[in-house]
Amino acid sequence: MKVPPGSITGLIGQNGAGKSTLLKILAGFLVPETGRSGGAGGSGDDGEVFVDGLSYRKEPMAVRSRIGYMPETPLLYREMKVVEYLDFVGKLKRLNKEKRASECERLIRDCGLGQIYHKLIGSLSKGNRQRVALAQALLGEPRVLLLDEPTSALDPAQAIEIRRIIQGQKGKPPGGGGAVLMSSHVLSEISAVCDRVIFISSGEIRFEGSIDSFKGKSLESLFA
C-alpha cells in the first residue's frame, strides 16, 4: 500500500481486520516478522515500511522522527498540565527549548487548547483529552500523521472540531508533502475528510484508491 504525499487517506475495515495493528507497525510500536520460512508461520514474505525513501529496518530513528501517532486510546499523563505535557513530548522528540515553546504556542492555538492549556489533563473531558492527544501527535510537524479512530466516543460537536483540525493538516508540514493516514468506523467521516481510502480485511488489502473513483457509489457498497 502507498500513502501519497499531500493526501489524507482513510483506513477502513471490520473489527479485527488489522487496522490498529497496521498503524502500530507504521508507528514503530510493532516490528514485522522476518525470516519466515513460508510454512505454518506464513508465506515467507517480510513486511517493510518506507517513509521518505528511508527504510524502517535500516534507519528506525530517522523514520520515527518523521511520524506523529495518535492511538485509539491515548495514554496521557493525567497529573500533568496540558502545556507541561506538550513540552515533555517535545523533549522526547528532541526539540530545543525555543522550538518547544513555539510548537506549544502553535498547537494551543491550532487545536483549540487556549482555555485548558493550564489545566491538569486528568480534569479534562473526553473531547478535550482527544485534542491534547492530537496536539502531541502534531508536535514537531511530522511528515506522516497516523490517527487511530481519532473521533471515537466523541459527541457530534467534538467530532466535527477534530475533523476540522485533521483537514487543516493536508499538505503540511511547511513546504507541503505531508501525509495523513487515519482509521475510522464512521464511513461518512472518511468520505468527508479523506481523498483516498484503503479497505483491508483479514490483514489483506481489498481496495485502494481515491474517493472520487466510486463515481456516485458509497463506501457502504464497498463494505457490502
Image (cartoon, helix red, strand yellow):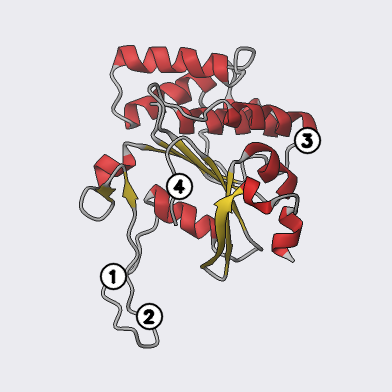
x, y percent for residue 174: 39, 21
**What is the CA distance from the residue labelled 3 to the residue labelled 2?**
43 Å
Question: Within 10 angstroms of label 2, few (less than 14), some, or many (20 or more) residues?
Answer: few
Of label 3 and label 1, which has the lower sequence position? 1
**Three-letter code for the amino acid on which mark 1 is drawn:** Thr
**Three-letter code for the amino acid on which mark 3 is drawn:** Asp
Foreground disc of the pair 3, 2: 2
Of label 1 and label 2, which has the lower sequence position? 1
Task: Give residue 34's mark.
Answer: 1
Foreground disc of the pair 1, 4: 4
**What is the CA distance from the residue labelled 3 to the residue labelled 1?**
42 Å
Of label 1 and label 4, which has the lower sequence position? 4
x, y percent for residue 36: 30, 78
Task: Give residue 3's mark.
Answer: 4
Task: Give residue 155's mark.
Answer: 3
Q: Quadrant of residue 166?
A: top right
Rendered residue at 71%/54% (across/down) = 219
Rendered residue at 70%/50% (across/down) = 215
- 93 up-or-down from 224: above or below: above
Of label 4 and label 3, which has the lower sequence position? 4
Question: Within 10 angstroms of label 3, few (less than 14), some, or many (20 or more) residues?
Answer: few
Question: Within 10 angstroms of label 4, few (less than 14), some, or many (20 or more) residues?
Answer: some
**What is the CA distance from the residue labelled 1 to the residue labelled 2?**
11 Å
**What is the CA distance from the residue labelled 4 to the residue labelled 2?**
24 Å
**Three-letter code for the amino acid on which mark 4 is drawn:** Val
Q: Circle 2 sits on which residue?
A: 43
Foreground disc of the pair 3, 1: 1
Q: In the picture provided, is 135 more to the left or to the right than 194?
A: left
**What is the CA distance from the residue labelled 4 to the residue labelled 3?**
29 Å
Judge by depth and name the residue closer to the eye, 96 or 172.
172
